[in-house]
Amino acid sequence: MRLEWGAATDRGLVRTMNQDSMVANGKIFAVADGMGGHLGGEVASKIVVDFLTKLEGFAGKQGLFEAVKEANVAVFEHSLTTPELSGMGTTLTMLVPFEADDEFDRDLIEILSVGDSRAYLLHDLDLIQVTEDHTYVGELLRSGRISVQDASMHRAKHVLTRAVGVEPDIEVDLWEIQPYAGDVILLCSDGLTNELVEPQIRKTLIEHTDPQLAAQELVSMAKKSGGSDNITVIVVRVVEASPVAPVEGATAGRGIDSVAPLDRKGASPNEARSKTPLSRITISTNTKRTATTAIPTPIPRREVQRTSLALKILRTTLFLLAVTVVAGVVAGVVDIYAKNSYYVGSSGKYVAIYQGRKGGVLWFDPKLVKVTSVAVASVNQARQVELSSGVVEPSLAAANLFISNLMSEVKSQKQFQSSPTTVGSG
Ligand code: MG
């Protein structure tokens, strides 16, 4: 099998960063559209793409599934150990070419998909959507509960029901394409399909036979249509493929134990095209959930906001805690400072001892400890001035000593009326 390819990615016109990741190297082609907050989406899509790119190869379909299963665990475990990445995930749509060998009797292209990044096949000038969107609306649409018209207007249009990395289990769709020379396969993130309609995509793929030019043109068209999301496009052209007559019926699940062909009511327009060699299987690590008509629980893209809300609460709590600690220390210091200070002043007509500082320290008001029998009027003028501003003493004992001295002064004043400056200090 010989392939030519081109790829382009763009942040778009609205988003501040590009959370899409991609790889196109001939062995693997993949588009991953990350979800999950400021950084989460970018991290998740990059982990998955890097993980898959580093692998030597894939041991058939089961190998593909095993690889994505491991990539899923890698993202999930990373999100558990890094709180700000909690809830991150990514879509994944990948294409892997398999040459005819022991497992495959002819060249085959396998497409694995989780989420709402799509794969299209341009075959004989028909554009066929290969993958199904794993969105809440997509599930409702396929189960016949809403119309195509409703779906395009639906509020929950972008709520994913499957993604890589958000749960320990993963469920993937695997599509098999029998390639013919001239076939073109397009892998893209929803930034393309939300802006362009299928006829535009088809026309562009037909007009631009150079895959790189086609990819660039599609990205630029999506930007012109609004570019409201990151846009990633990979165009793979089949130049040559082993010429073998199409096999009757689907070759579903060879070598895979847990194959669960989707039980669907009537074929989709895609499957109705009998000439298109396309078959699908769904593989899940969750044995409880096989493919049925049950609509899985949506994985809200809003998950992220909840995470950042939790983060904000955590940050606020830590901040408040820090403030509380600082305030506690300040309170302690003030308390110690205030409680270990005494001053001698007056209470009414008498000299008194207070605990604290005159006028108070912050919220700590001075406390009256003792009112003495010494009348303020009985002490000399200089002492009265001192008392009115408060005579600070380092301890209650020191304050008591000051009072004793004051009493001696008063006594000596009475004895020697003429000598107001005599100090009875000894
Ligand atoms: Mg997107």
Image: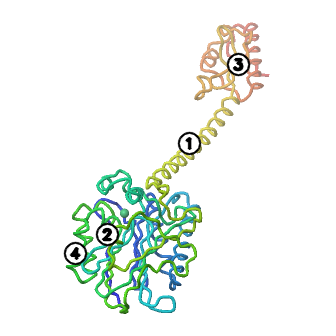
Tell which circle, 3 or 2, labels the residue nearer the N-terminal end. Answer: 2
Q: CA distance from mark 3 to mark 1?
A: 39 Å
Q: Nearer the viewer, mark 4 or mark 3?
A: 4
Kind of element beneath mark 4: helix
Give the quadrant of the N terminus: bottom left
Image side of residue 215 versus residue 111, left or right: left
Type of amino acid under label 2: Asp
**Neighbour tally class for label 2: few under 14, some 14-19, many 20 plus, Cα within 10 Å:** many
Which mark, residue 320?
1
Tell which circle, 3 or 1, labels the residue nearer the N-terminal end. Answer: 1
Type of amino acid under label 1: Leu
- Asked whether 313 or 106 is in front, the reply is 106
Task: Tell me the quarter of the picture where residue 331 sits.
Answer: top right
Tell which circle, 4 or 2, labels the residue nearer the N-terminal end. Answer: 2
Q: CA distance from mark 4 to mark 3?
A: 95 Å
Residue, x 55% and y 45% (percent of image)? 319
Kind of element beneath mark 3: strand
Task: Tell me the quarter of the picture where residue 371 sits.
Answer: top right
Residue, x 52% and y 75% (percent of image)? 65
Type of amino acid under label 3: Ile
Residue 18 in the image: above or below residue 376: below
Give the quadrant of the C terminus: top right
Which mark, residue 204?
4
Image side of residue 226 versus residue 352, left or right: left
- Asked whether 14 or 94 is in front, the reply is 94
Tell which circle, 4 or 3, labels the residue nearer the N-terminal end. Answer: 4
Specify the quarter for ligand 1. bottom left
Type of amino acid under label 4: Thr
**Dot 3 corresponds to which residue?**
353
**Neighbour tally class for label 3: few under 14, some 14-19, many 20 plus, Cα within 10 Å:** many
- Asked whether 239 or 419 is in front, the reply is 239
